[in-house]
Structures are given as C-alpha cells and as structure tokens.
Amino acid sequence: MNTVQEIERAIDALTPDQREQLYVWLDEHYFQAGDMQLKTAIEAGRFDDRIARALADDKAGKTEPL
C-alpha cells in the first residue's frame, strides 16, 4: 500500500467535523490553481485599471451600497 492510499483510507475514517477541519486546513495551506492564477494576476497589476475605475465611480457617486 502506498502513502496516498493510506491517506485516502484515513480521510474516509474521519467524522464529518474532522473532515471539515481538514478541508479548512488544506484551504489555508495550499492554494488552488484558480487562487494562484488570481494571485499572479493581482501581483502583475492586471486589475489596477478596473480598481481605479471603480474607485473613481464611487467618488463620483455612481455606485450604490450593497
């Protein structure tokens, strides 16, 4: 048996609460592919123009509260 199979069996043995704790831990410690793409795009400044436009619209009173 390899380590992946052991992990799979261990996960199957978890209670729902323990499984939820595991999901939270994984989400905090490992980026998903989409998360990494978003992080890269933000760091590259690909959203800067949209953010500036949104802030200008808000300052001009063109927005509504959620």
Image (cartoon, helix red, strand yellow):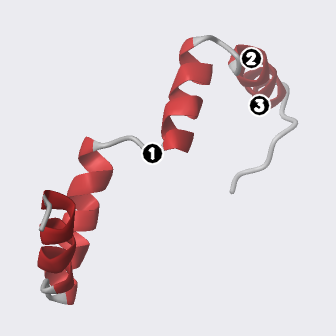
User: Few, some or many C-alpha atoms within 10 Å of disc 1 (few <14, some 14-19, many ≥20)?
Assistant: few
Question: Where, quadrant-wise, is the C terminus in this rendering?
Answer: bottom right
Q: Could you say where residue 51 lies in the image, as x and y percent from the top left?
A: 71, 23
| Residue located beneath label 1 in the image | 32
Question: Where, quadrant-wise, is the N terminus in this rendering?
Answer: bottom left
Q: Quadrant of residue 55?
A: top right
At 56% across and 42% down in the image, what residue appears?
A: 34
Q: Quadrant of residue 31?
A: top left
Q: Quadrant of residue 29?
A: top left
Out of 11 and 53, give the one closest to the viewer: 11
| Residue located beneath label 3 in the image | 58
Element on which disc 3 rests: helix
Q: Is residue 49 above or below residue 26?
A: above
Residue type at tag 1:
Gln
At 13% across and 86% down in the image, what residue appears?
A: 13
At 61% across and 11% down in the image, what residue appears?
A: 44
66 lies left or right of 23 = right
Residue type at tag 2:
Ala
Residue type at tag 3:
Asp
Element on which disc 1 rests: loop
Q: Are marks 3 and 2 in contact (CB under 8 Å)?
A: no
Q: Could you say where residue 59 lies in the image, as x and y percent from the top left?
A: 76, 24
